[in-house]
C-alpha cells in the first residue's frame, strides 16, 4: 500500500456525464476498475447554449427531467458524485504572470487581474483553475462562467446529489493514458468541440478547447490545423521533444484516415487510439464508448 493512496480520499464511486443530447450515470464496481451499472436519459439537443467563455446558459427544466428519470431508476440517489461536462463548456488561455504567489487565493487574484484584458466578461464572473507551465512565467488557466455551472450544480443538489469533482471530458480521459506514455498529446472529438491536452515532464502543459465547424469537411481541415499548431507550440515553448504519441478519443471513425495521414506527414508523431479492456464499460446502443470511458475515468482516477 502506498502512503499517498492511504492519505488521499478516493473520489465517489458514483459519476454523471452530461453531453449534447444525453445524461449518463455510472457506478463503479467493487474493485473500482469498471462500471457496474449505467443509466441513460435523453436531453434535448439544444438544452445548453454556448458563448465566448464556454457554457452560457442551461435549460433547467430539461436537465431536471433527465436527472429525475435517471435517479428514479436507482434504489436511492447517491449523496456524492463526480460530474463530467462537455469540453465545449470551458476555455483555456496561457497567461504571462512571472512568479505567482504561493497562496492560492493570492495567485487567483493575480490571474484575474491579468485576465481583465483577455475576457469578454468581468474576471469575477468566471471560475478558474490553473497549472504552472514547464517554464517560469507561463500559467495555463482554465475558465468557465460561474453562473451557468452553478445552475447545473443546483439541479443536482436539489435532487439530493452533491457534486464534488467537476471536469471537462478531455481531462477525465487524460487519466486513462498509459504510464510512461509521455510526452503525449490527447485529442478528443465531440460533435461540437475539439479538445487537446499535452502532457510532459509529469505535468499538463497545454489544454485547448475549440468549437468545431458544422460542416464535416471543414471540421476535418480545422482539426488537422489545430493539432499542427498545438504540436508546434508544445515543441517550441514547452520543449516537448521530436517524438510524440498522439492519442485520439473520438465518438466515430470519420477523422481516422485524415489524422493518420497527417501524422505521417508531420513526422515524429505516432498515432494511437485510446481504448479500454473488454468488460470495463458496457456496450450501449446509441452511446459512444468514449463517453462511458470518461464516466469511468473521473471516478476511477486516484483509486487504488
Image: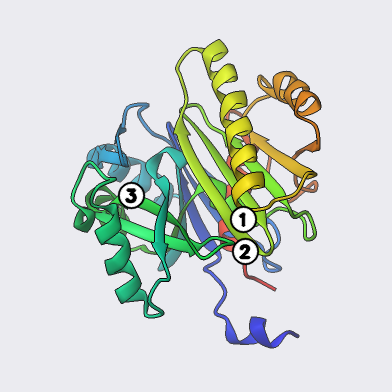
Label 3 environment density (alpha carbons within 10 Å; few <14, some 14–19, many ≥20): many
Instruction: Give the residue number, with chain letter if any, for mark 1.
Output: 297
Q: Residues within 10 Å of mark 2 (few under 14, many from 20)?
A: some
The reply to whether discs 2 and 1 touch (Cβ–Cβ < 8 Å) is yes
Whole-angstrom CA distance, mark 3 to mark 1, is 22 Å
Task: Work out whether residue 218 can be spotted.
Answer: yes
Distance from label 3 to label 2 (Cα)?
A: 23 Å
How many residues crowd around disc 1 within 10 Å: few (fewer than 14), some, or many (20 or more)?
A: many
Image quadrant holding the C terminus, namely bottom right
Q: Nearer the viewer, residue 258 or 304?
A: 258
Q: Is residue 99 above or below residue 268?
A: below
Q: Secondary structure beneath disc 1? A: helix
The residue sitting at 66% across, 62% down in the picture is 29
Instruction: Give the Cα separation between the discs numbered 2 and 1.
Output: 6 Å
The residue to which callout 2 is attached is: 301
Q: State left or right for residue 90 relative to residue 177.
A: left
- Above or below residue 192? Residue 134 is below
Residue 225 horizontal/vertical position (percent)? 58, 25
Numbered mark located on residue 144 in the image:
3
Question: Number of marks in the image?
Answer: 3
User: Up-down: is 112 above or below 186?
Assistant: below
Look at the numbered disc 3 and give the secondary structure of its residue: strand
Look at the picture and state if 262 lies above or below 250: above
Q: Is residue 140 left or right of residue 239?
A: left
Circle 2: element type: loop
Amino acid at each position: 500500500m502506498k502512503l499517498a493512496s492511504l492519505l488521499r480520499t478516493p473520489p465517489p464511486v458514483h459519476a454523471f456525464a452530461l453531453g449534447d443530447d444525453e445524461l449518463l450515470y455510472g457506478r463503479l464496481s467493487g474493485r473500482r476498475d469498471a462500471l457496474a451499472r449505467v443509466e441513460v436519459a435523453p436531453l434535448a439537443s439544444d438544452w445548453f447554449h454556448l458563448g465566448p467563455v464556454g457554457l452560457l446558459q442551461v435549460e433547467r427544466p430539461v436537465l431536471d427531467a433527465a436527472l429525475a428519470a435517471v435517479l428514479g431508476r436507482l434504489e436511492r440517489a447517491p449523496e456524492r458524485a463526480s460530474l463530467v461536462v462537455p469540453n465545449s463548456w470551458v476555455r483555456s488561455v496561457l497567461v504571462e504572470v512571472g512568479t505567482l504567489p504561493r497562496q492560492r487565493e493570492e495567485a487567483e487574484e493575480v490571474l484575474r487581474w491579468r485576465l481583465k484584458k483577455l475576457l469578454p466578461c468581468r474576471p469575477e464572473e468566471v471560475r478558474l483553475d490553473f497549472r504552472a507551465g514547464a517554464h517560469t512565467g507561463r500559467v495555463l488557466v482554465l475558465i468557465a462562467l460561474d453562473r451557468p455551472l452553478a445552475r447545473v450544480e443546483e439541479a443536482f443538489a436539489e435532487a439530493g446529489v452533491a457534486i464534488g469533482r467537476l471536469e471537462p471530458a478531455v481531462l477525465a480521459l487524460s487519466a486513462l493514458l498509459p504510464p510512461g506514455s509521455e510526452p503525449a498529446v490527447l485529442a478528443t472529438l465531440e460533435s461540437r468541440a475539439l479538445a487537446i491536452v499535452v502532457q510532459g515532464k509529469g505535468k499538463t502543459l497545454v489544454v485547448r478547447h475549440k468549437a468545431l465547424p458544422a460542416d464535416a469537411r471543414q471540421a476535418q481541415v480545422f482539426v488537422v490545423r489545430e493539432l499542427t499548431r498545438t504540436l508546434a507550440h508544445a515543441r517550441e515553448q514547452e520543449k516537448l521533444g521530436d517524438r510524440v504519441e498522439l492519442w485520439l478519443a473520438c465518438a466515430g471513425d470519420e477523422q481516422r484516415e485524415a489524422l493518420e495521414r497527417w501524422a505521417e506527414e508531420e513526422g515524429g508523431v505516432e498515432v494511437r487510439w485510446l481504448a479500454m479492456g473488454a468488460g470495463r464499460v458496457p456496450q450501449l446502443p446509441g452511446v459512444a464508448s468514449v463517453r462511458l470511458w470518461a464516466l469511468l475515468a473521473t471516478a476511477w482516477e486516484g483509486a487504488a
